[in-house]
Image (cartoon, grey):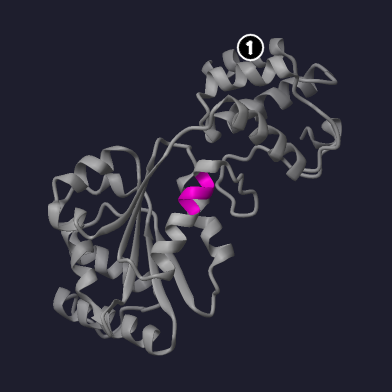
């Protein structure tokens, strides 16, 4: 809608995580490297926490760009608040099993899952399962079922690597399940961006969208940081609204007044 006005090739501030636009802040880079380490060295479980919109899902999507698809199979479950048996079914479906000729027995399902994971390993493929929104798993038995997946091993290596992604309450849930906590090899909390990285983030998103000039004033970026608290998703939402309001006013630059009005508009 506003691309031509601002000289952009595509919308710079989408609110859907994209692996193609990955801002490598120090903490995002560290989170990515830690997850890669856990995957490549078959460490069992890695856990990444952070507030809504900090970039957890984006990092997981970026992993696919770094993993050889011939050596790693990475699948994501986005709605994990399931009963244990339903969780196993969901994992099987994600891994390509159509669940034909099963009676729904958890024992049978687990046997099929182990055979599938073993088949992958025999073919030189490591299976990785990312469990997004893991903090919503309220059933302790479901969390324990995830831990039990690590009992599937071959040649002293886990047949599956789990990546647990969630908001800070996940830390409390895991702490209350000591057997699972002890299996976690990597734990990292993704903090919001600081003011300097928020500036770099906005410029990075604009440049990735084809911007050839500065669009936001320094004062505008300062207000954006104050509002967003350095959380990328909030930054995206506000910047997108700023560009829309700027278009309607035929502005050449986003100044602090436009940011203030965009903040008010978002709150309406």
The residue sitting at 66% across, 16% down in the picture is 259
Residue segment shown in magenta? 28-32
Nearest to the observer: residue 250 or residue 257: 257
Which x, y percent locates residue 111?
A: 21, 82
Magenta segment's dominant SS is: helix
Badge 1: residue crowd in 10 Å (few <14, some 14–19, many ≥20)? some
The residue sitting at 41% across, 76% down in the picture is 126
Q: Is residue 135 left or right of residue 180?
A: right
Q: The N terminus appears in which quarter of the rendering?
A: top right
240 in magenta:
no
What residue sits right under mark 1 in the picture?
Answer: 260
Q: Is residue 102 left or right of residue 118?
A: left
- Residue 179 image-quadrant placement: bottom left
Nearest to the observer: residue 59 or residue 194: 194
Nearest to the observer: residue 247 or residue 169: 169
The answer to whether residue 48 is above or below residue 252 is below
The residue sitting at 85% across, 21% down in the picture is 252
Which x, y percent locates residue 260?
A: 63, 12
- Residue 121 image-quadrant placement: bottom left
The answer to whether residue 93 is above or below residue 235 is below
Which x, y percent locates residue 14?
A: 63, 40
The residue sitting at 42% across, 36% down in the picture is 52
Judged from the image, the secondary structure of the residue bearing numbered disc 1 is helix
């Amino acid at each position: 809608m506003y691309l031509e006005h601002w000289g952009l090739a595509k919308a710079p501030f989408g609110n859907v995580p994209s692996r193609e636009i990955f801002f490598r802040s120090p903490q995002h880079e560290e989170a990515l490297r830690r997850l890669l380490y856990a995957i490549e060295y078959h460490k069992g479980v890695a856990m990444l926490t952070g507030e809504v919109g900090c970039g957890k899902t984006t990092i997981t999507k970026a992993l696919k760009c770094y993993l050889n698809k011939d050596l790693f199979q990475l699948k994501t479950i986005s709605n994990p608040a399931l009963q244990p048996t339903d969780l196993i079914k969901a994992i099987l479906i994600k891994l390509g099993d159509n669940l034909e000729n099963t009676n729904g027995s958890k024992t049978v399902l687990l046997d099929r899952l182990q055979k599938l994971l073993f088949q992958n390993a025999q073919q030189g493929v490591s299976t990785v399962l990312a469990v997004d929104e893991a903090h919503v798993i309220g059933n302790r038995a479901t969390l324990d079922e995830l831990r039990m997946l690590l009992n599937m091993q071959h040649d002293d290596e886990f047949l599956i690597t789990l990546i647990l992604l969630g908001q800070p309450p996940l830390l409390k849930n895991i702490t209350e399940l000591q057997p699972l906590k002890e299996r976690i090899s990597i734990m990292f909390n993704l903090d919001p961006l600081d003011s300097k990285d928020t500036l770099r983030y906005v410029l990075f998103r604009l440049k990735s969208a084809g911007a050839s000039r500065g669009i936001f004033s320094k004062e505008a970026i300062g207000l954006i940081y104050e509002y967003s608290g350095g959380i990328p998703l909030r930054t995206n939402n506000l910047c997108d609204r700023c560009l829309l309001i700027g278009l309607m006013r035929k502005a050449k630059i986003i100044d602090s007044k436009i940011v203030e009005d965009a903040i008010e508009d978002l709150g309406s």
